[in-house]
Amino acid sequence: MRRLLIAVLIASALIATSRTGALLPVYAEPLPEQTRKLLEKSLSVVEIDREIARISGLKGKTQVEIDRSERQLAEQEIAIAVQREKAGRVLRSYYMGYKDFWLSALLNANSLPEIIRVWDTMDMIVQSDNKAMNSYSDHYQLLRKGYSKLNTDKAELSAVEKQLVTQRERIIALQNDLDQALATSGDEQMLLHLMEELQAYWKNVGLYEVKQHFKALANAMHNLPDFVKKTPGIIQSTGLKTKLTLSDAQLNEFLRGEDPRFKDFSFKFDNDLLTMEGDNGNIQVTIQGRYTVENEPENSIRFHVDKLVFNGLELPDTTRADLEREFDLGFYPQKLIKYVKAQSVSMEDGNLIVQLSIGG
């Protein structure tokens, strides 16, 4: 009975906020574990479904690109056949001795005007031959690049199709788990209504709010090198070695100066993890992740989201990956000092420590 009452109260709050358009407040008390897991799964269903839609769109675009490439390659095959024949005629003329005629004509010329006339004719033929050979070479290289791109597109399409199958299987299994849990809950209709309201809130408000926070973080990180350069003690150099040590207190100071919404956030470095927690009374967000040194497409310290919790509910890996694709929370050492490269990164005792070296 108590669990049912809590579910009713939560559902009433959700209904009230969704009808008035107000932000959904964070829960005043922890949800029952079973209810929390059901809500997490219902959000996962929404987010995996969104990932399926993204992958389906990518599959469609890739297939269109493959079809276009195949049409272009068919046209190039015809064009290269013509160029191949021209190049073949040139090579045959060299190997069969047709050029000896012009050499003999040049040697047997009896006057300067005749030599010039033979030379001009030879030059015109040589230029024509070179043009034919170069044209064939250009068409051949273009064709090779076209087939290489086609093979890449087909491999990408195959990978996308596998992702699509995996996510579809995943959402079916998740939906089955939800159906079974609801059937044995004793208050199926109320929980269904609760999940529907939460899903609607997430789609209309929650996802937007989370993305706004990630966008603000990405914009702020773009300005971090300037903060580092003007703050004494963060950069320390010894010979060709340079170390960057940024404390979480300094990061909090920097971010709160960049965007007022981070006044409700706290940032902490520890155990090789960056943990960001915020609660403004309407939404509660926890983001936890790690930094890695990467060299492609350029040397950088990239942030990877390992955990994302919204209003007490953990979101699936597809949401984390989507946010990583859309928002760059990385740090680029060469925007700080030219010709340096990050060698390692760690987070411990409230500090982000980056070892840098000049020239890699």
Image: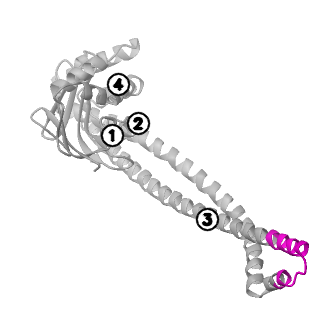
Q: Quadrant of residue 16?
A: top left
Which element is circle 3 on? helix
Q: CA distance from mark 4 to mark 2?
A: 12 Å
Q: Quadrant of residue 42?
A: top left
Task: Decide which of tag 2 and tag 3 comes sooner along the chain.
Answer: 3
Looking at numbered disc 3 in the image, what kind of residue is underneath it?
A: Gln
Looking at numbered disc 1 in the image, what kind of residue is underneath it?
A: Lys
Residue labelled with disc 3: 141
Mark 3 surroundings within 10 Å by alpha-carbon count, few (fewer than 14), some (14 through 19), many (20 or more): few
Looking at numbered disc 2 in the image, what kind of residue is underneath it?
A: Glu
Query: Considering depth in this image, is 28 or 69 the residue closer to the camera?
Result: 69
Q: Quadrant of the N terminus?
A: top left
In this rendering, which labeled residue sits more in front, label 3 or label 4?
3
Residue labelled with disc 1: 338
The stretch in magenta equals 104-124
Name the side, left or right, on which 150 lies relative to 36.
Answer: right
Q: Where does the image place residue 310, in percent across and percent down from the top left?
A: 27, 28
Q: Is residue 224 above or below residue 162?
A: above
Residue labelled with disc 4: 216
Name the side, left or right, on which 144 lies relative to 230.
Answer: right
In this rendering, which labeled residue sits more in front, label 1 or label 2?
1
**Furthest-bottom residue in this view:** 96
**Furthest-top residue in this view:** 20
Q: CA distance from mark 1 to mark 2?
A: 27 Å
Q: Are marks 4 and 2 in contact (CB under 8 Å)?
A: no
In this rendering, which labeled residue sits more in front, label 3 or label 1?
1
Q: Where does the image place residue 114, in percent across and percent down from the top left?
A: 90, 75
